[in-house]
Image (cartoon, rainbow, N blue to C red):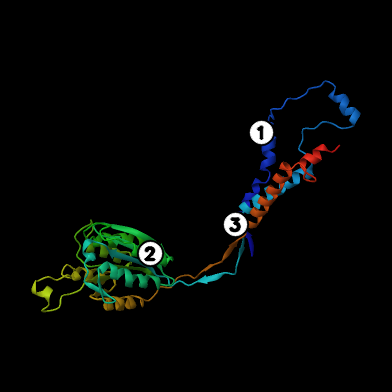
Amino acid sequence: MFELAWPWVFLLLPLPWLLRWLLPAADSGDAALKVSFLGELEALSGRRASASLPGWRLQLPYVLIWLLLLSAAARPQWLGEPLPIPTSGRDLLLAVDVSGSMDFPDMQWEGEDISRLDLVKHLIGDFITERHGDRVGLILFGSQAYLQAPLTFDRQTVRTWLDEAVIGIAGSNTAIGDAIGLGVKRLRDRPADSRVMILITDGANNGGEVEPLLAARMAASEQVRVHTLGIGAEVEPGGTLDRFGFNPGGDLDETTLRAVAEITGGEYFRARSSEELRAIGNTLDRIEPAAQQPTQARLADALYAWPLAAALLLSAWLVVRRLWPVWPGSVHDQGARP
């Protein structure tokens, strides 16, 4: 179906004639000969001197160029058949911890030791890409929480923002409560049954302005479901780290994360390895979607280039006629005829 996106542009059609009528005549700078017997010359020739516009044949190319420019500015387009957009109705907001402890290399990926954040990028990135029909957003938090990507159907861009996340970009502490509060603020205007937040951290709340449990109660009042995910390996009994009394996952506050999930109607998950994190992603992927009104979209092919190209070619032709004196039928040639 043919359509003009901006048909009101054609209201500018009389603009050149209005400007000629309103603006004073331009001074050519050439010397002019004034004679007192102009009336007699007009009577002898049977013509009257006129200051009006030139003949319509000379005006026609310029009128056509103006019409072509207006047609291009009106954004002509061809609309295809309406196509349904598959939507599951979920608005999924990911809150990822980027504090200093997420740089600890206690995770495995394809036989190599990598940091916790790198593992999140690998597996949660795939999880984001596969959320067909969901709006996905991204919050990065450390000492403070920042909205890195608003809710959008462009999942690939959200994954790119996650891949570009840097340790310490939001500070060295862990503001779990602030991250939940920011998520509630972004989800509260969405349909009640589709508000889902997944919070990923490896530590305990030691920064920010809002306590996690207070933020959880606020999320529950706004019907935001918060799933919490604790990440970090545990030492093997009798291992080297165990003998030295070092536990890389010891900072994780599982009690608070469980409480946040319970208050909001979500679930708590523990990821000690890449296999567990992948299984958690599969579990989260089975969250029951909330129904949402189906939407449709039409593919639009822009056609403005055709009238724009025609106006350009016609303008070039007029320039050639004026600059090439021997061109047959040129302005100079017409002016020289009796």
Q: Earlier in the sequence, mark 3 or mark 2?
A: 3
Residue at numbered disc 2: 160
Q: Quadrant of the C terminus?
A: top right
Left or right: residue 76 compared with residue 329: left
Q: Which of marks 2 and 1 is nearer the N terminus?
A: 1
Instruction: List x then y, in percent, for residue 127.
Output: 36, 73
Q: What residue type is labelled 2?
A: Thr
Evaluate if marks 3 and 2 touch, with contact meaning CB atoms under 8 Å apart: no
Instruction: List x then y, in percent, for residue 190.
Output: 40, 64
Question: Number of marks in the image?
Answer: 3
**Vertical placement of 186 versus 40: above or below?**
below
Mark number, residue 23? 1
Evaluate if marks 2 and 1 touch, with contact meaning CB atoms under 8 Å apart: no
Residue sitting at the far top = 36
Residue at numbered disc 3: 5
Instruction: List x then y, in percent, for residue 6.
Output: 60, 54
Q: Alpha carbon of mark 3 to alpha carbon of mark 2: how far?
A: 32 Å
The residue depicted at 68 percent of the width and 31 percent of the height is 26
Secondary structure at badge 1 equals loop
Left or right: residue 80 compared with residue 55: left
